[in-house]
Amino acid sequence: MAADGTPVELEFSQLAGDGTSPRLLLVGPSLGTAVSPLWRECATLLTDVQVLGWDLPGHGRSRPASGGFLVEDLAAAVRSRASEIAADRPVTYAGVSLGGAVGFALALEPGLVERVVTIASAPQGNAEFWRERASLVRRVGTAQLVEGAASRWFAPGFAERSPDVANELLKSLVDADDASYAWACEALAQFDLGERMSTARVPVHSAVGELDHVVPPKPGVDVFTGCAHLPPPEDPRAVAAYLVDKGFAA
């Protein structure tokens, strides 16, 4: 529910499989990215699973937000839509960065989602950093973030090896609605599930990129070698293999 009382509305895109697939995998985006270029190639490497991705408000296919919202509001919207389409199939979830924060929130609500993977994410945000980012975007717009985003999102050499993918992801940042992006930053500023995650009743597997300076590797967290902040497009085969290993797909 947005701050003005209207529901948070998210658009979903089918990335692989269909309604006849025996299980459902929901995938979530990083802030500033559309979900399709982020997850598309990885999704095609998975079998026996319908992969649906959702877009943040004002990103990709989702309409701009009408007011502020919380990470938990995004999780509620994802859970509501998934319950409509699951049709008694096992449901799993994987998300990157802000999409991973939604995964942590989903893990606190057992019943629908059976297991969660978070990538390049943490169960709490840096309040000061994200409030400053929100203020910056309101002043200059998301297009002014592209240069910095490229250096954070991608490991050295990725943009040269995969220019079409890198450019599509950066274009999704330029095209993002400034107000919705700023509200998403403020949602991260308020996000803190650190102490509550010990009570999660849904298995959570967390991984980060080896070269990620936003959410750097730490003990107990799995690592994608040679990746920065966006492992699914940087090394789709490694991420797909990780999801299979954790029981998310065949």
Image (cartoon, grey):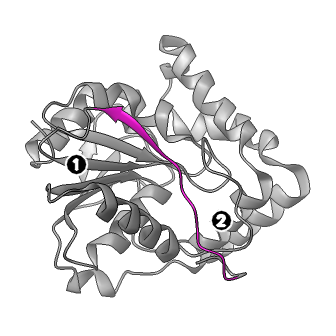
Q: Residues within 10 Å of mark 1 (few under 14, many from 20)?
A: many
Q: Which range is magenta?
A: 5-16
Residue at the disc numbered 1: 24
Would residue 122 be seen by someone viewing this image from the given angle? no
- 76 vs 50: above or below: below
Q: 72 or 233, which is in the foreground?
A: 72
What residue lies at 30% left-to-right and 59% top-to-bottom?
Answer: 218
- Of the residues under marks 2 and 1, which one precedes in the sequence? 1
Would residue 51 be seen by someone viewing this image from the given angle? yes
- 87 to the left or right of 229: left
Can you tell which quarter of the image residue 205 is in? bottom left
From the image, state whether disc 2 or disc 1 is nearer to you.
Answer: 1
Q: Position of residue 240 (x, y in %)?
A: 22, 34
Q: 156 or 38, which is in the foreground?
A: 38
Residue at the disc numbered 2: 185
- 235 to the left or right of 147: left
Q: Position of residue 28 (x, y in %)?
A: 42, 51
Q: 65 or 176, which is in the foreground?
A: 65
Where, quadrant-wise, is the N terminus in this rendering? bottom right
Residue 119 in the magenta stretch? The answer is: no
Task: Check disc 1 and give the amino acid type.
Answer: Leu
The answer for how far apart the CA atoms under marks 2 and 1 are is 29 Å
What residue lies at 50% left-to-right and 19% top-to-bottom?
Answer: 157
SS at circle 2? helix
What residue lies at 36% left-to-right and 43% top-to-bottom?
Answer: 52
Q: 102 or 125, which is in the foreground?
A: 102
Q: Position of residue 5 (x, y in %)?
A: 67, 83
Q: Position of residue 148 (x, y in %)?
A: 69, 40
What residue lies at 32% left-to-right and 86% top-to-bottom?
Answer: 196
Q: Are marks 2 and 1 in contact (CB under 8 Å)?
A: no
